[in-house]
Image (cartoon, helix red, strand yellow):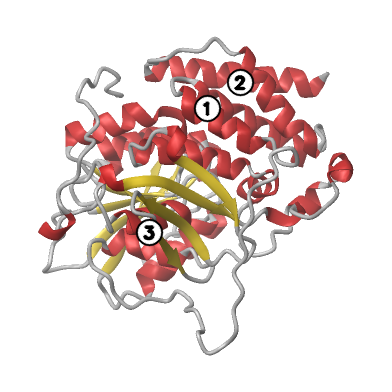
């Protein structure tokens, strides 16, 4: 099912931006989108925050896009409501027990039901799917994203874990299959846009911005007392619980550093993080001449989602706009890595490559779950991740099977650690 022996090298040089094709290091062609019908979109993880925002974009597109497939793990009630609203050709419920809750007549006429991860992988390969939005949270999104890339699809990638876990393998697969990966994370979308201002050899540094989360100014000596309810109150973004906790620990920025390392083919030493509480500047690219190109917009995920769906074109959409008739203050400060040690872990994993990203991601997913369940303190999340990252049997050139094995190992280590 997985082509783990892909040997094609990752492209490192894009075509000149002036020739009208992608500025991306790995996408050297335009997606061949049909002009005589709506673009058919498969939304994986449609009931999550990215998935619901994607449906907003589709419904406001004036018929340019059509929701062809909606998939969720077990949120059947929300999935049925979405299906009745947008009437997709397919609905996929990955969890078989959850799918059993669907009674006869639950779905609208013309919408078919598929059940299980294998069915989802088969459908994302279907020629009828023009673009795939990969918005399944966590490591669970790797299999379906791999299937879409292997089928040569254009993938709007919100599942950062795919590249954190298996970045080199996925990028080589895209080069081999002709698949295109367009980022949906606001930071990586901003970087994509800014990179069009120069050539790869002119890039001095890429700076990912971070809101700093809810605890940017909280005394660090009180971090051990942070409750899940406090960690879930993000000051600027509305996201799911796992991603919101990642923002509070700044582990989201650690994972984004690793993602950027493989997504853009940029050495880890050229990647940096800057805290920007207003979440208006979504990332910056510094070029060798000293120019810094940034992308600005209100914190609204519908904009990067739409950019990934319409690329290389730009169209009107539902995202909020900046109001330049009102005063605006933009602040920037370096991250406090003593307060937020996760940022250091991200730099380390991005520099090491190999299995470091997969192990860090697995340990973090398990630790965040334990924190939300009350089995770990807030400060234990980064501590557990550091311990597992330091002690794991590192592999420099892992296969997908080895990545899967170490993912399971890291989760067991954290469960054992939290149980103690």
Which residue appears at 30% of the width and 19% of the height?
4
Q: Is mark 2 on a helix, strand or loop?
A: helix
Q: Could you say which disc has been placed on residue 291 in the image?
A: 3
Name which of mark 3 and mark 2 comes first in the sequence.
3
Query: Which of pointers 3 and 1 lies earlier in the amino acid sequence?
Result: 3
Q: Are marks 3 and 2 in contact (CB under 8 Å)?
A: no
Q: How far apart are marks 3 and 1 (CA)?
A: 28 Å
Q: How far apart are marks 1 and 2 (CA)?
A: 8 Å
Tell me residue 255's x, y (percent).
53, 38
N-terminal label among 1 and 2:
1
In the image shown, does 290 or 227 lie closer to the viewer? 290
Left or right: residue 105 versus residue 3 is right
The residue at 82%/36% (across/down) is 377
Residue 346 rendering spot, x and y as whole percentages: 56, 34
> 81 or 264: which is nearer to us?
264
Residue at 29% of width from left, 47% of height from top?
A: 202
Circle 1: element type? helix
Quadrant placement of the N terminus: top left
Q: Is residue 392 placed above or below 146 in the rendered structure?
A: above
**Tag 1 residue:** 349
Q: Name the residue under label 2.
A: 389
Q: Which of marks 3 and 2 is in front?
A: 3
């Amino acid at each position: 099912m997985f082509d783990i022996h892909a040997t094609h090298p990752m492209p490192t040089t894009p075509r000149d931006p002036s020739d009208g094709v992608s500025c991306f290091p790995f996408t050297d062609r335009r997606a061949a989108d049909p002009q005589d019908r709506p673009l058919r979109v498969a939304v994986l993880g449609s009931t999550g925050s990215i998935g619901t925002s994607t449906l907003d974009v589709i419904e406001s597109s004036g018929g340019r896009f059509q929701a062809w497939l909606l998939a969720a793990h077990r949120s059947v009630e929300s999935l049925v409501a979405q299906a009745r609203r947008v009437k997709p050709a397919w609905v996929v419920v990955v969890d078989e027990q959850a799918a059993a809750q669907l009674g006869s007549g639950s779905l609208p006429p013309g919408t078919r039901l598929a059940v299980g991860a294998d069915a989802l992988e088969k459908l994302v390969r279907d020629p009828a799917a023009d673009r795939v939005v990969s918005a399944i949270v966590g490591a669970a999104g790797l299999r379906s994203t791999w299937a879409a890339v292997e089928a040569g699809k254009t993938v709007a990638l919100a599942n950062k874990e795919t590249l954190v876990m298996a970045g080199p393998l996925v990028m080589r697969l895209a080069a081999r299959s002709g698949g295109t990966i367009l980022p949906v994370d606001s930071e990586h979308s901003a970087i994509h846009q800014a990179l069009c201002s120069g050539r790869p050899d002119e890039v001095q540094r890429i700076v990912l911005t971070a809101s700093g989360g809810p605890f940017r100014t909280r005394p660090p000596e009180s971090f051990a007392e942070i409750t899940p309810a406090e960690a879930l109150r993000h000051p600027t973004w509305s996201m799911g619980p796992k991603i919101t906790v990642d923002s509070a620990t700044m582990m989201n920025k650690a994972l984004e550093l690793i993602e950027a390392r493989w997504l853009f083919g940029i050495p880890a030493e050229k990647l940096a993080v800057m805290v920007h509480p207003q979440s208006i500047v979504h990332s910056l690219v510094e070029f060798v001449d000293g120019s810094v190109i940034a992308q600005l917009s209100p914190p609204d995920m519908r904009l990067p989602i739409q950019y990934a769906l319409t690329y290389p074109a730009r169209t009107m959409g539902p995202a909020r706009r900046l109001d330049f008739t009102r005063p605006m203050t933009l602040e920037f400060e370096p991250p406090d890595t003593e307060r937020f040690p996760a940022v250091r872990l991200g730099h380390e994993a991005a520099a090491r490559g190999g299995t470091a990203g997969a192990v860090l991601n697995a340990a973090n997913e398990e630790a965040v779950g334990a924190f939300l369940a009350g089995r770990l303190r807030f400060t234990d999340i980064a501590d557990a991740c550091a311990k597992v990252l330091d002690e794991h049997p590192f592999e420099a050139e892992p296969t997908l099977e080895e990545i899967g094995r170490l993912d399971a190992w890291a989760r067991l280590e954290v469960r054992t650690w939290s149980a103690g």
